Every structure is written in structure tokens, then in C-alpha cells.
Image (cartoon, helix red, strand yellow):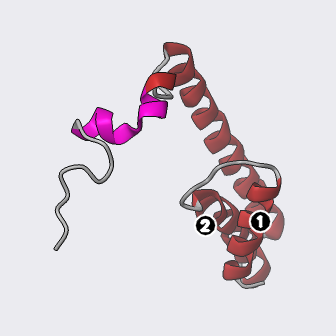
């Protein structure tokens, strides 16, 4: 299976389960990385069982580590902006102006 097909299917899956991945990082790096590890066992000279086990262990480690990291950020209150900043727009917070202000037309 071509990895490009996995990217499309992975994005469709994320949309279906309502997970926001704006840049498609999981389908490209996670799903295709998992496929790459397993494909090495299928098409290469490596033991398939070892490749599957290694791919699953790496996936579990990455998920567990990032889960703990983000839960720590959430508990510290630094994961999201405040509701007021979200409603006002992040242009105000980051640049001190609303979108389009200060931009002159040609």
C-alpha cells in the first residue's frame, strides 16, 4: 500500500473521530512511520515479528510520553489561551492588533 493512501485515510479517520490535527502530523509521521517499520519486515531482510513489536513499542512510548507532557501542561494551565483571548483573537495577543488592521491595500 502506498503511504500517500495512508495519509488520506488517516486524515479521514481523524475527522471522523473529531480529532484536530491541522497539519496532518499523525497520518504522515505516526501512521506512515508505523507502516514503514512494518513494511521493512515484509519487504526487507528483517524479521516481521521484530519489526511489528518494535513499531508498537515505539508508538506506545511516543504516545505515553507526549500524553504525560500535555497533561502536565494542561494541569499548569499553559496548554490553551484564555477564553477572552480566544474570543478576541490571537492577533491582539501576539501583535496588538486585530486581523487586517494596519495592513494597507496596494
In which quadrant of the rendered view does residue 39 lie? bottom right
Residue at 66 percent of width and 69 percent of height: 32
Residue 90 drawn at (x, y percent): 38, 38
Q: Is residue 94 left or right of residue 71?
A: left
Residue span colored magenta = 85-95
Mark 1 surroundings within 10 Å by alpha-carbon count, few (fewer than 14), some (14 through 19), many (20 or more): few
Is 89 colored magenta in this rendering? yes
Q: Give the prevailing secondary structure in the magenta stretch.
A: helix
Cα separation between marks 2 and 1? 13 Å
Instruction: State the SS at label 2.
Output: helix
Q: Which residue is mark 1?
A: 12
Residue 74 position (above or below residue 47)? above
Q: Closest to the observer: 50 or 32?
A: 32
Residue at 56 percent of width and 15 percent of height: 75
Is there CB contact under 8 Å for labels 2 and 1? no
Q: Which residue is mark 2?
A: 28
Amino acid at each position: 500500500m502506498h503511504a500517500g493512501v495512508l495519509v488520506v485515510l488517516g486524515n479521514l479517520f481523524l475527522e471522523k473521530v473529531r480529532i484536530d490535527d491541522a497539519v496532518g502530523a499523525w497520518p504522515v509521521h505516526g501512521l506512515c512511520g508505523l507502516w514503514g517499520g512494518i513494511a521493512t519486515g515484509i519487504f526487507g531482510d528483517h524479521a516481521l515479528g521484530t519489526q511489528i513489536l518494535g513499531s508498537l513499542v515505539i508508538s506506545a512510548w511516543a504516545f505515553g510520553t507526549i500524553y504525560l507532557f500535555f497533561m502536565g501542561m494542561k494541569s499548569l494551565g499553559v496548554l490553551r489561551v484564555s477564553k477572552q483571548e480566544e474570543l478576541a483573537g490571537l492577533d491582539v495577543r501576539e501583535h496588538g492588533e486585530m486581523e487586517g488592521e494596519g495592513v494597507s491595500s496596494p
